[in-house]
Image (cartoon, rainbow, N blue to C red):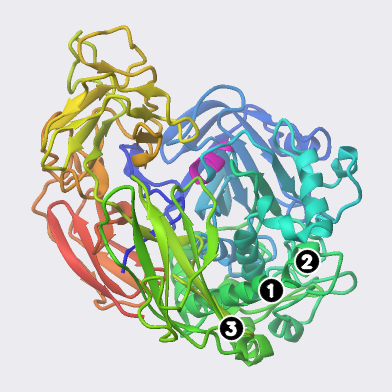
Amino acid sequence: MKSLLLAGIVPFLLHPAVYGQNFYDISTIQHIEITFSQSNWDYILDTAKTGSDSYTLADWVEINGVYFDSVGVKYKGNSSYNATNTKNPLHIELDHFKSQDYNGTKDIKLSNGFHDPSTVREVYLYYIARQYMPAPRANYTQVIINGQPMGLYTNVEAITGTFLADHFFSQDNPFIFADSGGCGLTFPGSDSTLYYTPYTLKSDYGYAALSQLCDTLENNGAAIENILDVDRTLWMLAFDNVTVTLDSYLGNSKHNYYLYQDENGRFNPIVWDLNGGLGGFSQASPGPGLSVAQLQTLSPTLHATDSLWPLVSNLLQVPMYRKMYIAHMRTILNENFVDSVYYNFTQNLQAIIDTAYQSDLNAFYSYYEFTSNLTDNVIDGPKTIPGLTYLMEERISFLNSTTEFQQIPPVIASVTSSDDSPPMNSTVFITADVSNTSGVFIGTRNSITEKFVRQPMFDDGAHGDGAPGDNLFGVEIAVGSGSTQYYIYAENTSAGVFSPERAEYEYYLLEPEKGVVINEIMADNQTTQPDSYGEYNDWVELYNNSSSPIDLGGYYLSDDLLNPAKWTFPAGSVIEAGDFLIVWTDADSTQIFGLHTNFKLAASGEAVILSDTALQSIDQILFSDLGADITFGRYPNGTGPFMELYPSYNALNSQVVSIDQSNQELNTDFTVYPNPATDFITIATDFTEPKTYVIYNSAGTLLVSDWITEKTTIPVSSLSSGVYFVRIGDKTKKLIIAH
């Protein structure tokens, strides 16, 4: 079995911030204090909200002890905002009046807990969504304004250019916000002005592209995969349906989502505003809202025959898409809502915020309603907000009883390749052992920026698949100089199944043998190593894993995934076997001693791509914000996964320690329990100062990196069953996850 990776996800590696907090750490409550010079700040924000919707200047905002002056603040929200509320949702823009950010975050979106007595709906639903599609991170914060405690808020990552760059590696393409009601993606005509309302354009252009999407969806379904990421759309619709999230495209208002057109020309939906999920919003179509019993028995194919919801009706009329959609629903249900996984997770969330909620004098619900809404319904005026278990236990039973869920999908027993480490620019056979199927397909791509291309697999004895008719399906695929990402999809006349189940967001990875690799990156060189001219510039270290010299003359190095030919290695750039080669990324090609590129690296994070003379990617890496004099390198040297390291310029990467540990004592010890684990683990230490823990799998892929003091509980229900490792300092503990 090949390595299993998250599509588009780069492990978040922390750098030295005040208190060392990840701003969206699900287990940590943030602290935000806002100070206005005006004592009537609430009236000013209300006036701006109902008028020009402009930002009001706050004298300063303090976030976890870090102070920012001249910050933009305004009220946000539609139904969750009310001028009579003491606690309204907030939008804070740190860089509205001047350039500043908190660990890379500039936009802060804070929700006020409207129509959610449990106060866990948003955080939990975003957590689920991130397992299957790009979605914001979310946690909690306490807010004080002009010395007055405002209470507990949900802190949701804003979908901005930074979010787009992190997940789609671009941010300047058509970007649409479907915030207002009526964003159903029906086709009123080709005139761009017909889309000005209700859609909100967040980019410089895009209405014409939106019109083309609506036209294709309605009139040219055969071409829909050219302009819409269909798989990601099916994941969003499956997510909304399973979790009864109707304040979305799936509900009456057909809103609360973004559309971003990636570099392949395809629109990608992004979920937003999930506080009405898990039955908190009950209107599925015009007319009165649904009863709790109707929410429990919401049809898995809601709106499948309704032309007002073409994203549902036009996609689900395609038999393959319909079976893929139900397969995604099964995965979401089974991974998040069976065996009380969701109850344990949300109970843990409430434990994190329990004290903060009790001290919130502006909460919309009593403490009793807060604790009881995990299980029991809460009456809120004319609304009944279902208890989470009251809603979902019946929904689990109902969905499993439906005709769609009763169908028996194929069984994918195994997926293998003829060569786990094939030579570059060769071919391999991928085989899948599949029973009860009428068709097996493989989706492949060679870069995270490409779209998957689906093709059939064969059981004819001519494709590396053994004997004809033995349920072993095969296909020959080309392997270039870079990695190949792939997944398997199988279906019969009534149901479909993926391997891995979270495809296309997760996939198998086939890595060819690599000679030269990117070995270490220094993006903020302050004092570590000067170049031949005495300048402390950024550098990229390459390493030759092979037993022969390699001439890189005519190869390319770049920091732009869309322009891999940015800088060319000069002739004679030879890297000896088992040796290193330093390239100074200083945008100074006039310097003749050493190799100097025509671009610089961004310390805030970006990509580094090494390509051969045919512009085939040999190696590429994405890195997040690095601190000064800290590198991002492979450990073990030349072959291992990337992590933050102490610099080892032109030498073996030997010390596995992240920047977060730079002030920690090593030789520390800790315990992990329960072990084996299913849904949560607790890491217990005797530390008095924050230290970093990391969790990685048996393939060396870093999955989690965060801070710990004394004890913390971490959700692990999203991790597949298997062997993992938890490391703090130089101590490592084996962790077994058994679902």
Q: What's the residue type where badge 2 is placed?
A: Asn
Given this view, does label 3 or label 2 mark the residue nearer the observer? 3
On residue 492, which mark appears?
Answer: 3
Q: Are marks 3 and 2 in contact (CB under 8 Å)?
A: no
Mark 1 or 2, nearer chain start:
1
Query: In the drawing, does residue 609 fall left or right of residue 128?
Result: left
**In the rendered image, the vertical position of residue 124 relative to residue 186, given as above or below:** below
Q: At x 67% / y 32%, what residue is drawn?
A: 39
Q: Quadrant of residue 418?
A: bottom left
Q: Position of residue 295 (x, y in %)?
A: 72, 80
Mark 3 in CB contact with mark 1 (< 8 angstroms): no
Q: Which residues are magenta?
A: 161-167
Question: Which residue position holds label 2?
Answer: 314
**Do we see residue 250 in this rendering?**
no
Q: Which one is nearer the viewer's eye here, 167 or 80?
A: 167
Q: Secondary structure at mark 3?
A: loop
Q: Nearer the viewer, residue 128 or 623?
A: 623
Dot 1 corresponds to which residue? Answer: 279
Which sits earlier in the primary sequence, circle 3 or circle 1? 1
